[in-house]
Amino acid sequence: MKKILLTVFAALVFVLPAHAEYNAAGRVPTVGKQIVSKNGLPSTITFKVVETAADNSEATATKVIQVSKQNLIYAGNDNEVAAIVAQEIGRVMNAQVSKEKFRNLAKVALASTLSSDNVLNTAANSEFADNKFSEKDNMDADITGVDLMITAGYNPLAMVVLVTKMPGSVWESIKGDPSNAKRAMNIYDYLTYNYPSKVKAGYACNEYRFFLTYADPIVEKRNSSAKKLEKFQKEQAKKKAERTKQIAKYKATGGLNGWDATYTLLENFANSSEN
């Protein structure tokens, strides 16, 4: 028995330091370059690791995409670093950061002398000012990131694992669900329909196995209903078409979008009003 315990302890001594030595931040440039190159994105794109939350509101202009160390602490290998990098690229591609920038300007304007302007009131009450909008944006960025990861040769199931490693709600913990279960399920559903071979290949870690104990009953229940299954298939096909269109649009325009143009107009209007 003593010999067995010593053997286990010796194994841990060798295994644990290897995991602890993985430098996620140091892998960002290499992994990011791989995603950019394999997806045919502008070669001028570079990546910067920051201590705070990533702010990519100027990424379209600067071609510098920030990646937060706060997220990188959850990455244990290159696949998971790729998931974080691809999420940030996905947010830029989907114009999420442009919409957030516009929303922030609208909030400032609402507190100023422009607060009575109809344009700003409309902005404040529209979908992008709602909390659910942020949740939807993040889920869209996840599955855009999945497409980028697959093309670059990374395991897309790492995206599922990554979001379940991040802090979730107290209610999820009480129920015994994975963290960010809804978001993780959105990724898994997208992969199940659009990339079944990737799901079949699996992902060897405890977090993914735990997630499957949550996901498998949901999938089984859905597949048992022809009506629910048909609805699911239509939704996933639509999502894939939207992601393909968004990526193509980004490549064609270099990331410029209507939200950036609207932001510029509103900013100029605000500055002229102040003057």
Image (tube, rainbow, N blue to C red):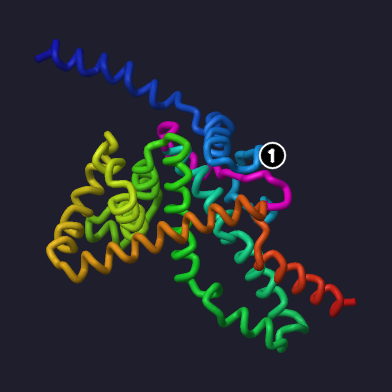
Q: Report x, y in % for residue 208.
A: 27, 42
User: Is 85 situated above or below 222?
Assistant: above
Q: Write down the quadrant of residue 169 in the picture.
A: bottom left
Q: Report x, y in % for residue 203.
A: 29, 37
Magenta residues?
60-79
Q: Mark 1: which secondary structure? A: loop
Apparent side of residue 63 relative to residue 227 in the rendered image (left or right): right
Apparent side of residue 48 relative to residue 139 in the rendered image (left or right): right
Residue name at image x 81 percent, y 76 percent? 269
Residue name at image x 61 percent, y 66 percent? 99
Residue 188 drawn in magenta: no
Near-viewer residue (221 or 210): 221
Near-viewer residue (135 or 17): 135
Q: Which part of the image, by quadrant, shows the C terminus?
A: bottom right
Q: Identity of the amino acid at label 1? A: Thr
Residue 179 visible (yes or no): no
User: Is 166 situated above or below 121?
Assistant: above
Q: Residues within 10 Å of mark 1 (few under 14, many from 20)?
A: few
Residue name at image x 49 percent, y 40 percent? 72
- Residue occupied by mark 1: 44
Apparent side of residue 65 relative to residue 234 in the rendered image (left or right): right
Apparent side of residue 200 relative to residue 186 in the rendered image (left or right): left
Q: Residue furthest left?
A: 1
Q: Write down the quadrant of residue 229 in the picture.
A: bottom left
